[in-house]
Structure formats: structure tokens, C-alpha cells
Image: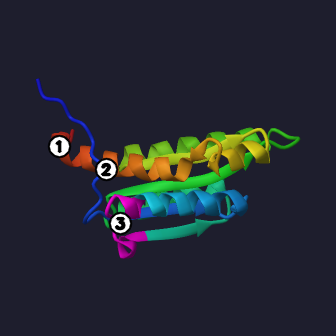
Amino acid sequence: MTTFVGDREGSGRRIAVVAARFNEIVTAKLVEGARSALAKHGVADDDVDVAWVPGAFEIPLVAACLARSRRYDAVVCLGAVIRGDTVHFELVANESARGIAQVSLDTGVPVIFEVLATTDMAQAEARAGGSHGNKGWEAAEAALEMAWLMDQLPAMEQT
């Protein structure tokens, strides 16, 4: 039996981060958490690129461009969608999640989804360095684990 388990070692890894400017007070903290985690695990600052997009809905397009470039071992997607008075919240959160997942499946590059979908700003802040930790940090660690794991798995047959 072969067991494959990811590793968080980041030396020599290139990571892209796509972050939404909408709710930047939250996403800036997520980006900071991601960059700190990458540095802790050995990713050089010059090997991390950050692309800022207007909002969470725009994340998948830029993530696809970065993943298809094959310059990155993984792409980390960060944003915050906070419930308002309309169903717009659900549309943006759902389509962002769907698009990000599709990029990963289409390219074979690990594309990590960490777009917070919260009821209010307090919940978002709690997940961006508050009482629930920093989900940007966790997303960066997941990116490193998935990049390592993808390197270990047998190549998929093209059909």
C-alpha cells in the first residue's frame, strides 16, 4: 500500500495569491497571514506574487490566468463576502467557489479557496487574525501541502 501525504516545506516553491479588494480591511489581513505562513515554511518573498482584483467574483478569472501560466506551484484565493440585505451575497459566494474549484480541475494546479462567506463583519474579522485564527495562513499551508502532494502523485493519463 502506498500512502501519499502532503508536506508544508516551501523552499523553491512559487505561489500566487489572488485577493479581492472588496472588504479589503479583511482581505489585507488574510493576505498578510498567507504571506507570513509561506515565509515561515521557507517560501522566498520573491517567489510570492499577489494579484489584487476588484471583488470575489473576479478571483476565478485571474486565478485561471496564473494557474495556466505554469509559473506557480499553487494559487491561493482570498476574499470576504459579507451578507447584506439581498441575495447578491449568495450569488457572489457561490459563483466564486464554483469558479475557483473549476480552475483547479481544469489546470491540475492546486487552487485554494479561502473566500470567507460570513453573516457580518465581526465573523469575517474573527477569521482574519481574530479569535478563529487567520484563514489566509491556513490557505497558504494547504497550498504548500497540495503542491507537494501533486508532485508525488502518479501522472494522470490523458484520454
> Residues under labels 1 and 2: Cα distance?
21 Å
Mark 3 vs mark 2: in front: 2
Q: Which circle's residue, 3 or 2, is located before the other in the chain?
A: 2
Residue positioned 49% across, 52% down in the render: 137
In the picture as drawn, the residue positioned furthest to the top comes out as 1
Using the rendered view, name the quadrant where residue 52 is placed.
bottom right
Residue type (three-letter) at the residue carrying disc 2: Arg
Mark 1 vs mark 2: in front: 2
- In the image, 102 versus 129, the foreground residue is 129
State the extent of the magenta-drawn residues as a range.
38-48
Q: Residues within 10 Å of mark 3 (few under 14, many from 20)?
A: few
Q: Which residue is mark 1?
A: 155
- Element type where label 3 sits in the image: loop
Residue positioned 62% across, 43% down in the render: 95
Using the rendered view, name the quadrant where residue 25 is placed.
bottom right
- Element type where label 2 sits in the image: loop
Q: Which circle's residue, 1 or 3, is located before the other in the chain?
A: 3
Q: Which residue is mark 3?
A: 69
The C terminus lies in which quarter of the figure? top left
- Element type where label 1 sits in the image: loop
Residue positioned 62% across, 54% down in the render: 79
Residue 8 image label: 2
